[in-house]
Amino acid sequence: MGSYWIDGLVLLAYFALIMGIGLSQRSKSDSVEGFALGDRQTPWWAVLASILAAEISAATFLGAPESGFSNHNWTYAQFAIGTVIARIIVSYIFIPVFYRHGVVSLYEYLGTRFGPKTRVVASATFLLTRVLAMGTRLYVSAIILVLAYGLWKGGAVSSNERFLIFAVALTGITIATAIYTAVGGIRAVIWTDFIQVGVLVAALGFTIWYLLGQLPEGWKTAMEQVKQPAFFNFAKPADEPGVLPWLRNVFTTEYTIWAAVIGSTFVTMATHGIDQDTVQRMLTAKNRRQSAFATILSGIIDLPVVSSFIFIGILLAAYYRITPDASLPTESREAFPHFILTRMPHGMCGLVIAGLLATAMGSLSTALNALGTSFARDFVFPRMGGDSMSQDLQVKVLRWSTVVFAFLIIVVGLATAWYMAHDPKAKIIPLVLGILGFTFGSLLGVFLVAVLTKRRGNDLGNIIGMVSGFLAVVFLSNPLDVQKAVGIAEPFVLSFPWRVTLGTLVTVAISVCFPTAQKGSHS
């Protein structure tokens, strides 16, 4: 255990660097434009790094290897197809509108287009959803600490011990991230994201190189582990001919080519087109052309990055097949952290753990800045005088809003940690992506009506449409008892990649039935 001090030094150096960079941006964040948008002076390559850091969370760091370790293929990586298609749509439809209207909070545009009620409901939906999603993601980064404690203890870790470790870790990470985010604003987020992506890539590259070196015949041995379908899953039922069984399979199976091309496109349009969390990064670019370039390029880079994470899972499956380990955890999501702690050389172990923390802090800082900005712009400023407020007071509200949401995320994270500590078989990716699926379809639907039409949609219709979209997703996505209660003989459970698509289509179908009032007809 004596050599673990090397890993500790690596982690301390990482935290010192991140905190130093974040806090150094305070002097450039003393205005609303500076705090929320970096005065729109961020180079495209820094925007690109920040987008990647925002979307590659700790859930990806452990969830994608879990998929490769369990499924022995790259079917999860199919989703990258839809993410590229969606980014092209976002770059040509949404980003120009947001730049033209000069919005800071995206939901200001909905207020201009439809009215104040749509703006408030949409912003509140984003705030609630992002807090829940971020809180559930946050606990993931502490999984490795639970395993480390188990190795040190030399025995099983109880549910209460797991929860305590989760609680301390997620609270510490959130407080540290909130400090530099509240002080340095969006510039602190973007430049720490840039460092965090560098650490992540270094950790990813070293892990693959090291694992290949541990396998006899390297690549050849790894490929023997791959099971069909290796990448594309067309969801064709093996034993039921006909269109209806195939359609049921398409909409109830998680990782298929149809979910990748259609479902993933709608999901990414939501996360990268109408989600303050990610779009705020795009709006810091010098102009909409640079913003679009960074957005599309991030989607192209996403495929090799996610594929690399999945490849680590496949390599781990091959490694443990050849080198059995009696102490390997039974839960597949813990295979990668276990390997990091028990097999990687010291120093490199610290680097990979830093990469895991980088994904957690990158996603968290992005969320905190977006949550604070939307809450202040959409709820606090209108009640405190709006533009008549001094810049100092506005920035102070932005900073304190960031702190408030850090506290709320900690609360959700603790609840998630309790649930996961007592139900260790729950899978990571469906949990994280599933939360967004319930509400982001409704948000996307309203924005599509706003951008693609000039005289359709109003406050009343939009709210009815959003609520209907949400209820449709809830009804088809989850409890079988609900469907059985209304007399459905064969319950249908929609897989999580399709939730945003359903919510969007229902919301659009209802919202366009309501005409826009004359004064809000411009867009």
Image (spheres, helix red, strand yellow):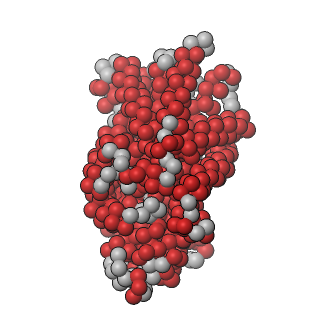
Which quadrant of the structure image shows residue 211? top left
Q: Which residue is rendered at x = 35% and y = 75% of the image? A: 523
Between 341 and 58, the residue placed more toward the observer is 58
43 lies above or below 344: below
Which quadrant of the structure image shows residue 487? bottom right
Between 446 and 253, the residue placed more toward the observer is 446
Which quadrant of the structure image shows residue 2? top right
Between 376 and 311, the residue placed more toward the observer is 376
Q: Which residue is rendered at x = 55% and y = 40% of the image? A: 180
Is 177 displayed left or right of 245 in the figure? Answer: right
- Residue 20 in percent (x, y) is at 52, 32
Between 70 and 306, the residue placed more toward the observer is 306
Q: Which residue is rendered at x = 55% and y = 19% of the image? A: 9
Residue at the extreme right: 160
- Residue 158 in percent (x, y) is at 71, 34
Residue 166 seen by the camera: no
Residue at the extreme top: 2
- Residue 144 in percent (x, y) is at 57, 31
Residue 276 seen by the camera: yes
Is 165 displayed left or right of 505 in the figure? Answer: right
